[in-house]
Image (cartoon, rainbow, N blue to C red):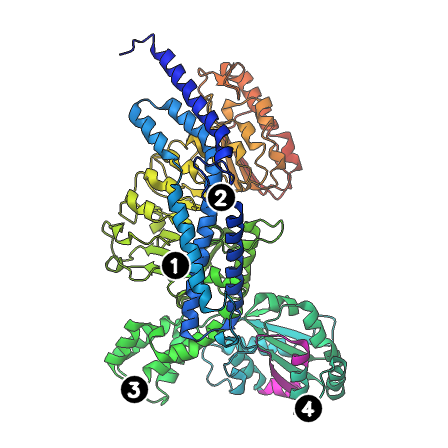
Amino acid sequence: MADKGEKPIIHTLRDALLHFAVKSKKLASPLLEPFGRASEPATVDDDELTALRSKLLRIRATLRDAESLSVTDRSVQLWLAELGDLEHRAEDVLEELEYESRRSAQLEELKLDLLRAAKNGKRRREVGLLFAAAPARRLRRKIDGIWARYEEVASDRRKLRLRPGDGAPRPAASALVPSSAHPRGCGGLHGRERDAKRVAALVRAPPDNGRGYAVVPIVGMAGVGKTALVQCVCNMADVRSHFDMTFWIWISQEFDVVGVTRKIVEAITRSRPDCDELSTLHELIVEHLAGKRCLIVLDDVWDDNPSHWDCITAPLSCCAAGSTVIVTTRSKKVAKMVNPKLYHLKCLSDDDCWLVCRRRALPNINTNIKQELVEIGKQISKKCGGLPLAGEAAGSALSNSISWEHWKEVLENGLWAGSEAKNLVLPVLKVSYDHLSSPLNRCFAFCSLFPKGFVFDKDVLVQLWTAQGFVDAEGDCSPEVIANGYFKGLVSRCFFHPSPAHDIGEGKFVMHDLYQELAQFVSGNECKMIQHPYSMKIDESPRHLSFVDEESYSVEEMHLNTFRGHHDLRTFLFIARTEQNQEKMTFRTKIPSELITDFECLRALDLSNTNIMELPKSIGSLIHLRYLALDNTTIKTLPDSICALFHLETIKLNNCSSLTQLPQGIKLLLNLRCLEIPHSNIQMPSGIGELTRLQRLPFFAIGNEPAGCGIEELNELVNLRGHLHITGLNNLDGAQAATANLWNKLGIQKLTLEWSELTNFNKPLCDPQGNAVGGISDRQGPGFNAAKDQVLKCLKPHSDLEELSIKHYNGSFSPTWSGWLPLDRNIGIW
């Protein structure tokens, strides 16, 4: 046994040998691995890698072509599903090869540091296994399996070319009969009397757009009753008498300028025009409408191209003053294009929806029914979410039998169980879905993982979409910008609505219950939401899986081993149903290490609100992971293996009060865009400044330890946005504070600067190199306040800051730079 004098020599010799091992491995690896610097001989050469990428591109092209077809043949649907599975497998293998090429180069230095810090042989063996390379044979088997599966699938459809009979193009117009084909008066409209009066007033009002005619856009979600309301208004006596002529044109999904103009001519002349020349069609419109006060309804407009709109409406300037064009649409973007002053038609109240339902269920208005049936009917109507179309479908289902047993069955089975809803409501809603682009289709279907009534956080949803690869890269635009555009598009089309329980600026949204059911319908077996403990076992093989807490009782400890074998899973989420539940540990479970290893394809993992206290070291095997959320857990440390997850983009640790430090290798996560830490007292390691893609870093704690994080690391983090809370400013002098360069963080909207409430004057400060410095730590009273003043002076932010908070600052003056912040900004100093 070595004595005390020999131990330093042994440690030095061990470090030297480890350092030599790392360096020699780096020198030798290019000779062993032409694909990169992995720690094993190459298993894939450049030609095979190119071929694999080429096959993936062909698979994607075939799948995108299929998205434009309406495929009803079951065998073709199965073939496309197999092709989609092959796409995912090829993506995973290519990403794994890329990971192995980077693993050695980026992790060896961290591995050396951890080995140096290891206190015993067991710990050194753990570190040695921590970042071990994937076995070459396993990768080889995966690649060979892809080639074999590709040949098998491709042989079914002549090397991945869709045959003419595989599906018909999606119809340019909906197969639904436009509701305008069934004119009605206002007698059947329940709860729309006020809307009808308001729209009638807008229709008769003089134009305020500088043209001879007014434009009244009416926007609302599918099935809310836009067309029925306009039909009611057009049939009102004072509206009919106000106009010389009234025309109704149903536009449909595909907006063809010549085609729509032909429809207008046909509506005016009551005959089909025999020409397709746009100028001739315009002349016919002018010939018949000149000098007449006209009411023209363009129903169900989808196209948001302003030039198309201008071309369609160009000849309408010939109409007499007081003419009006009514536009109904599901898109706010379309409505704002034709007139920023839009009319938003909202859902009915539950009572009015029950009247719609009752009218259809009991056509005989004098029919008396028992109060118990009324109560069941009202519960069913409530599920319709205020949509008149859903109310009518529910009424049709109830009309089959006026009995307690039948109505109770409809209530318990849900609206979608009956053929009435599927045949009437689903096609109307699905038209909106079919009109979305492919990326928005995937984003919307993903929302089926969340329960009805869930309050969506826009930023979280954007992070999850990005993690799944739903965002198509476009030039220099960041994925967040593109994904936010997707979300805005879904809001514009009424798939999402601002949450009434939150301020607009909070980014909280809700989805109508029927759209939630539509998401579950279109997602098929891709997504699975588990809401009951007894349904833990699943027979399907979903790619995205979520657990939702029970409303009525606390879930007993869940045994997740039932999900062993789901190797293709890409999403695994625990979801608290309400915001109140997000503040307490709702789920009791254990995360077996073997289960994590099984989820080798996982992109998003959310273990928030569970009772876990640690992550298994096997988390490092999830090399595809992009999103990791551990909010509101009692987790104490993060394993060092997490630093090997190079693709991680989001780490969320909010309300993890037991967590005291981050792994020292976190600086290796160069793709990290969001790092939400629990509190200001957490020990942040040096190197945070290397994470130059960071956009969200709510807390930044300045330490006074040599290995701690200094404020100079903020210098390179120019992409930060939202809220930045800097603590530990008592550990700085003015020169150090100036290195943060806060003025160039233009995305920061809210800035909090905090000094420690109780300053430790006896502990020496250190510069970024770890050398002890004098100055503010050994000064008290006026001198110390002067140092605070100098620090504050050097922390000047950009001039567009929306909110500034300065805490525990008892210096002698307000910052001089506060004068060039706008006067309406919220500034607090205490």
The correct choice, above or below, for 10 with respect to 346 in the image is: above
Q: Are marks 4 and 1 in contact (CB under 8 Å)?
A: no
Q: Which residue is mark 1?
A: 449
Which tag is nearer the camera, tag 3 or tag 1?
A: 1
Q: Is residue 518 left or right of residue 1?
A: right
Q: Are marks 1 and 2 in contact (CB under 8 Å)?
A: no
Is residue 698 visible from the viewing direction of this image? Answer: no
Q: Which residues are magenta?
A: 237-261
The correct choice, above or below, for 681 with respect to 221 in the image is: above
Image spot of residue 540 (x, y percent): 32, 62
Image spot of residue 148 (x, y percent): 42, 58
Which tag is nearer the camera, tag 4 or tag 2?
A: 2
Q: Residue at x 64, y 86 (%)?
A: 246
Image spot of residue 701 (x, y percent): 47, 31
Asked if the stretch drawn in magenta spans residue 253, the answer is yes
Disc 4 element: helix
Q: Which residue is mark 4?
A: 269
Q: Nearer the viewer, residue 514 or 91?
A: 91
Q: Residue at x 66, y 88 (%)?
A: 266
Q: Is residue 586 left or right of residue 40?
A: left
Disc 3 element: loop
Q: Which residue is mark 2?
A: 98
Q: Amino acid at mark 4?
A: Thr
Disc 2 element: helix
Crowd tier of the residue under label 2, counting other residues whose Cα lies within 10 Å: few below 14, some 14–19, many 20 or above: some
**Going from the N terminus, do you reach mark 3 or mark 4 first?**
4
Compute the Cα span from label 4 to label 1. 51 Å
Is residue 760 visible from the viewing direction of this image? Answer: yes
